[in-house]
Image (cartoon, grey):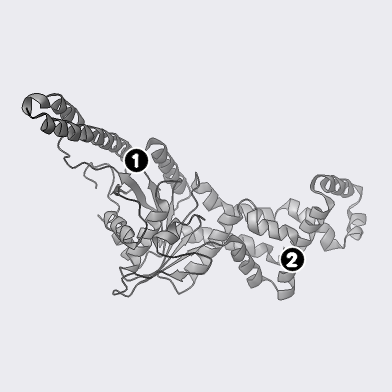
Amino acid sequence: MSASGESPDLDLAALVADPATRVIVTCGSGGVGKTTTAAAIALLAAEAGRRTVVLTIDPALRLAQSLGLTELDNTPREVVGVDTSSGGRLFAMMLDMKRTFDDVVTAHATPERAQAIFDNPFYQSLSSSFAGTQEYMAMEKLSQLRLSDEWDLVVVDTPPSRSALDFLDAPQRLGRFLDGRMIRLLSAPARAGGKAYLKVVGASFSIFSRLLDRILGGELLRDVSSFVSALETMFGGFRERAQQTYELLKAPGTAFVVVAVPETAALREASYFVARLAADDMPLAGIVINRVAQQSAPGLSATRAAAAAEDIDSALPDPVDAAIAVAALRVHVETAAVVEAQSRLIRRLRIAHPGVATHSVPAMATDVHDLDGLREIGSALQV
């Protein structure tokens, strides 16, 4: 248990060193240091002797910069400067949504059918910008990495979304869309031979078709129809793989780490993530609270420091010494007030989730932008 007795301490060093841990998923709202935490966890694992790959779904360049890479793409790139004396290595990659979708099509369709899909305008839009596609392809890539024998540990940096709902539910949503009644209806003309089909189903579909044609445009309707017809052999695979990946996230060996900062809104978001993961029976390792303020004299409260600043003139007759002492005390007052406020928020979080392990990471003096900075974060992640 923690010193305050509300929740246990999260020992990330032990988690990443455990051979049974195969996937760590970091999640949290934007601006809480989630990408940096994911990179620090991956570096900690690699230097503990594990062959590790960190996958970011966030298109920002923070991960590449902190790992000393000029760019990231869909191919794992080895990070130079990692201590490999224990036998571990570190690789990093950034999800390329379209390329991952293309790989899925190539793997599950004949070359002729795959080319027909690639050439379809509707597919080109779906694979690049359709809602939910990014999260679905992240799950596809995670499944590929996890099921290969190449990696001891996969660390996933999820998008800075407000809820875990998007990441967890996107595969099912996309699978239901591609296998849904509306898509089947739209693909019917291509499957049945165009006009011949309309004679079979009668005037009711003809009216429906004209309505869709007016709303979507005839060209888009034909693109959707031919796309789904070409993709038809893959329908079962989409849903099956989505379910397999979802079950993979719930399986032993996977651990979710929620990342937050000691601010009311961020901790409220963290509570939401915890509740959401619990509702889906996802394996939550714990919560990392970044950028926790520290003070050099923890025994001196803000109230006592403020009182001392008021009395300093009588204690120090030299006006220069007095001014310096007053300034130092006032800085301490401000820092102590922040520390006390953050402590109350963290304590409230721990009381609200007594069974959830937590770990606080002190605020760093500068932004993390290289491996040394990540090592400092990694040291702070250890109990």
Q: Quadrant of residue 261?
A: top left
Residue 195 position, x and y percent, is 91, 58
Q: Quadrant of the C terminus?
A: bottom left
| Residue type (three-letter) at the residue carrying disc 1 | Pro
**Residue 329 locus on image (x, y percent):** 18, 33
Q: Which residue is mark 1?
A: 262
Pinpoint residue 34: horizontal percent, then vertical percent: 41, 51
Q: Is residue 352 left or right of residue 110?
A: left
Report the side of 366 relative to 278 (left or right).
left
Q: Residue at x 64, y 57 (%)?
A: 128
| Residue position for label 2 | 119
Q: What residue is rendered at 29% in x and 55% in y?
A: 381
Q: Earlier in the sequence, mark 2 or mark 1?
A: 2
Q: Amino acid at mark 2?
A: Asp
Residue displayed at 42% across by 37% down: 265
Pointers 2 and 1 in contact (C-beta within 8 Å): no
The secondary element bearing badge 2 is classed as helix
Does 176 sit above or below residue 18? above
Residue 30 horizontal/vertical position (percent): 46, 46
Q: Quadrant of residue 375?
A: bottom left
Quarter where residue 188 is shown:
bottom right
Badge 1 crowding class, 10 Å Cα cut-off, few under 14, some 14 to 19, many 20 or more, is: many
